[in-house]
Amino acid sequence: MYADDETVRRILRDTGDTWAVVGLSDNSSRAAYGVAEVLQRFGKRVVPVHPKAERVHGEQGYASLAAIPFPVDVVDVFVNSDLAGGIADEAVAVGAKAVWFQLGVIDEEAYERTRAAGLAMVMDRCPAIEIPRLAPRS
């Protein structure tokens, strides 16, 4: 397990509501599309990050994290594990507060680097599962 429930709760509750979703495109058959919908339903602002920079779920897309012209709180990563470490490093560089690697996205060295840089980190979990399970109730 790469994050305990308290870390997940802290990210959901305390890190802010702007989530950059790396790998999010307008392809509704991809997991990122559905997870982004869940994030929006639970009050998160979803920022698509994809080379095509498409508008998704009403939000302007950007080709990279560095291209986003405003602060990002959480970087949610839907890319192959081989690419995920570079995305985590970019998240640190842009000043994100947390990085979330989706189910099946595992890079233990990136996990250690990201945590050493002071960011909260979740790996191999899905916020669409965790939000309904752990989000604070109003």
Image (cartoon, rainbow, N blue to C red):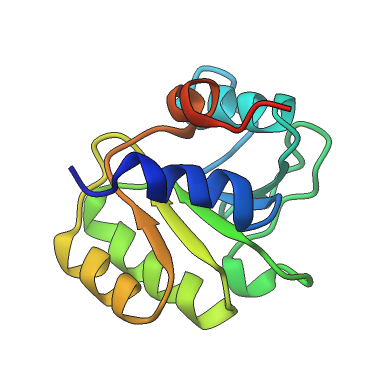
23 with respect to 137 (left or right) = left
Q: Position of residue 18 (x, y in %)?
A: 70, 53
Which image quadrant for residue 113?
A: bottom left
Is residue 8 visible in the rendered image? The answer is: yes
Is residue 49 visible in the rendered image? The answer is: no
The quadrant the C terminus occupies is: top right
Q: Position of residue 86 (x, y in %)?
A: 34, 70
Tell me the residue at 22%/49% (across/down). Answer: 2
Furthest-right residue in view?
A: 58
Question: Which residue is more in the foreground, 92 or 122?
Answer: 122
Question: Which residue is more in the foreground, 77 or 7?
Answer: 7
22 with respect to 138 (left or right) = left
**Residue 9 versus residue 16 in the image, above or below:** above
Which image quadrant for residue 5?
A: top left
**Residue 84 versus residue 34 in the image, above or below:** below
Question: Which residue is more in the foreground, 65 or 132?
Answer: 132
Q: Position of residue 61 (x, y in %)?
A: 72, 51
Tell me the residue at 63%/61% (across/down). Answer: 73
Tell me the residue at 78%/72% (across/down). Answer: 69
Furthest-front residue in view?
A: 138
Report the number of discs. 0
**Residue 100 versus residue 132 in the image, above or below:** below
The quadrant the N terminus occupies is: top left
Q: Position of residue 43 (x, y in %)?
A: 75, 35
Tell me the residue at 76%/31% (across/down). Answer: 57
